[in-house]
Amino acid sequence: MNIYVLLKRTFDTEEKITINDARIEEEGAEFIINPYDEYAVEEAINLRDEHGGEVTVVTIGEEESEKQLRTALAMGADKAVLINTEDDLEDGDQYTTVKILEAFFEDKDVDLILAGNVAIDEASGQVGPRLAERLDIPYVTTITSITIDGETVQIERDVEGDVEKVDTSLPLLVTCQQGLNEPRYPSLPGIMKAKKKPLEELELDDLDLDEDDVEPKTKTVDIFLPPEKEAGKVLEGEIDDQVKELVSLLRNEAKVL
């Protein structure tokens, strides 16, 4: 099987993030593989081990993204591709990403593409479904189980606290949800092997694209941290008095009545 994983380098949201002039300061920030993409990498490796084939991880970004690709290779992926946009793109959006990936997959023989359900930095959940539409292949989002038998695929997906079962076929794109598996930590032998595994670097020119082809369709107006939570109020006294005070607070302070 020819298995591909879409991977994104994201900020580690458990570390401190600094915002300056409506942009996140990258200097001093910690970066990781988008956690939902780790489920995709793990499942790709499991499916390869079960059915044979090859796992290729693909990311779009700058030179620094090589670190996250090497981590995926250390987990067990076979090959990695970095589509380097450092010299060609200042900004991009989901349209930009899909346009680049569409060009990359144009001449590829694909059986299965896995991606994270969302990226924790923007959480749009658009790239996977939009890419599948452009490639004209089926897609299933938020999967928590996948079984492949020949060309037939049985999937369970998360739907508002319940489970939906889907039967489909290859080629296919899926986005992965928590609960699908438990991503492994790269072992020391895996890290050593990753240094020798192929990592191909491409630019927009290699995909017959220029800046106008991938110009974003959206614009980020502002980025800001949520306000700090204020201390709560404890109402005291008789129940009737508490109710009156609560209604007054909701009307006069919270302005929700």
Image (cartoon, rainbow, N blue to C red):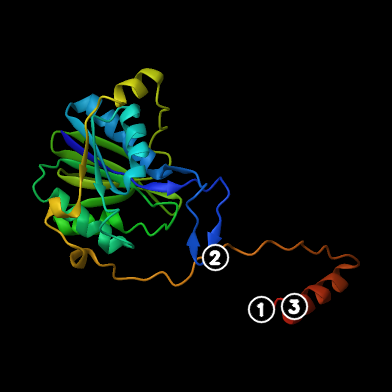
Given residues 94 and 208, the one toward you in this image is 208
Q: Which label sits in the foreground, 2 or 1? A: 2
Amino acid type, mark 2:
Phe
How far across and how far down the image is residue 30, in percent? 49, 44
How far across and how far down the image is residue 99, in percent? 20, 59
Residue displayed at 40% across by 32% down: 183
Q: Which label sits in the foreground, 1 or 3? A: 3
Q: Residues within 10 Å of mark 3 (few under 14, many from 20)?
A: few
Q: Could you say whether the residue bearing mark 3 is in a helix, strand or loop?
A: loop
Query: Can you name the residue that lies furthest to the right here?
Result: 237
Q: Quadrant of the C terminus?
A: bottom right
Say if 16 sits above or below 40 in the image.
below
Q: Which residue is mark 2?
A: 224
Which label was assigned to residue 253? 3
How far apart are labels 2 and 1 at the CA level? 24 Å
Which label was assigned to residue 256? 1
Given residues 45 and 85, the one toward you in this image is 85
